[in-house]
Amino acid sequence: MVHSTLVATLYVDPVMGNDANSGTRSNPYRSLTRALKETTSAKMIQLASGTYSTASGEAFPLVIPDGVMVLGNEATKGKGILISGSGEYHSQGFGTQNITLLLLGDAQLIGVTVTNPMAKGTGVWIESTSPTLANNTFTKCGREGVFVSETAKPAILDNVFVQNTISGLVMARHSKGEVLRNVLQKNALGIAISDLAAPFVAYNKVSENRTGIAFSRSASPVLRHNLIEKNIQDGLLVNGEASPDLGSTQDPAGNIFRDNGQFDVRNVTSKKLISVGNQLFPTKVQGLVEFATHTENTVKAVLFKTKFTDMAGHWATAFVEALFSKKLISPFPDGTFQPDAPITRAQYAALVAGAFHPVTKRQVPEFTDISKDYWAYDAIRVAAQSGFVSGFSNLTFRPEQYVLRLQAIVSLVSGLSLSATFSEDLVNYSDRNTIPKAALTAVATATQNKIIVNFPDPNLIQVNREATRAEVAAMVYQALVAIGTVPAIHSPYIVSLPIMEVE
């Protein structure tokens, strides 16, 4: 995230660099190992193309400290930037392991290719930390690409896991976190989730593995909108006492299972799995699986004129029209609002800047990917300087990237400096296990202030899903209600949970 000072960056080039250099753009280091020794001051390490191995001076395992980003090439998912090697790491729960990288705290690894060629070797090890892995490629590891353990809560986003000997991704012990928009292909096992792990797994493509996804012991992951196809044996294998969430009558899962060699879903437990809203044919299922029907939870539409051609009868019409009346939103050129489309960071910044007229709390540098003639330039500056939004460590803002529901909730609480009078432990959403621990207080605060709007099920917060334009419009309006600038609107989707106050 961008703070009020410029991010210190070190540069590494395994071909042209020298570890006796100063680590600047014009005088890069040769090894990542050398750069990691200087991370008391640097927060970002930029890697040039080439191979990072013992031959170029690397000492494995490479340990990325808390707060440090190692950045290669996001656009190519690390093509041509290879980190290859192995070293011993002594895990608290799993003993001695052979790993390539260890990520501490909220470290970030972005845009690199990782290979651990050693037998039983792991590419990235994550243990009781909350790092981010984004736009990387994990390939040809001797065991798995990524191993997540203990109480870890990583964000594993937009990566490729391909041709790893045993598994692409393994999650064990009490780990949680988000596994979103990854491709897992041609591994012996795409994703393995065991012990008491309960991650949110969504929008991934799992194909051409021996087995697509396997759950064991007491794992309880949530699966949403994944494509699980063309795996040689089973698409999903459920063992032990595992109890995955494959949808509910109020929250259809939207997973697609098809063309798997033996079964799309094989349940070898004694528990009945409930499948709601998945593309799954009974003839491709083995074991106890009940197919339930999605129950539409609708509210009677309020009949009044709407300026938007696609808002008649929509659950959020009242919120959208109220914001329109205050000139905070307007139709697209075709007259639509596109309520169910995901909202971009630029659109969100424009809305909060206009709605709250926030004051400057901090100075931020110019974002390198936003020109002064960009339509939302001024709004983004206002929203960033007031604490509603932040940029990224490489001084980009990524205006077209979508906003997650959790990000919108935390943003409104932070930007408005709201507070709560009760313990975050008393927030009882049915999918509470998907809320990161660091965000529990913000979610509790937003809940008490009646900012959170959940459609169709008020008890299901879905923090890791992209927020729609309608949802953000509703929550921004509710935030205006919370600070006393607009009257309340009745809606059955405004969350008002029974929460005990702390004495």
Image: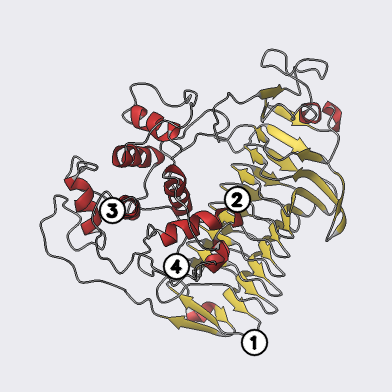
Q: Could you tell me the amino acid type at mark 1?
A: Ser
Q: Secondary structure at mark 2?
A: strand
Tell me the quadrant of the picture where the C terminus can be found: bottom right
Instruction: Name the residue that disc number 3 marks.
Output: 339
Q: Could you tell me the amino acid type at mark 2?
A: Ala
Disc 4 and disc 1: Cα gap in Å? 27 Å
In the image, residue 280 lies at what x, y percent? 47, 73
Q: Residues within 10 Å of mark 4 (few under 14, many from 20)?
A: some
Q: Earlier in the sequence, mark 2 or mark 3?
A: 2
Q: Residues within 10 Å of mark 3 (few under 14, many from 20)?
A: many
Left or right of 2 on screen, residue 9: right
Mark 4 or mark 1, which is nearer to you?
4
**Badge number at residue 270:** 1
Q: Residues within 10 Å of mark 2 (few under 14, many from 20)?
A: many
Q: Secondary structure at mark 3?
A: loop
Q: Secondary structure at mark 4?
A: loop
Mark 1 or mark 3, which is nearer to you?
3
Q: Could you tell me the amino acid type at mark 4?
A: Leu
Instruction: Name the residue that disc number 4 marks.
Output: 460
Image height check: is 408 above or below 425? above
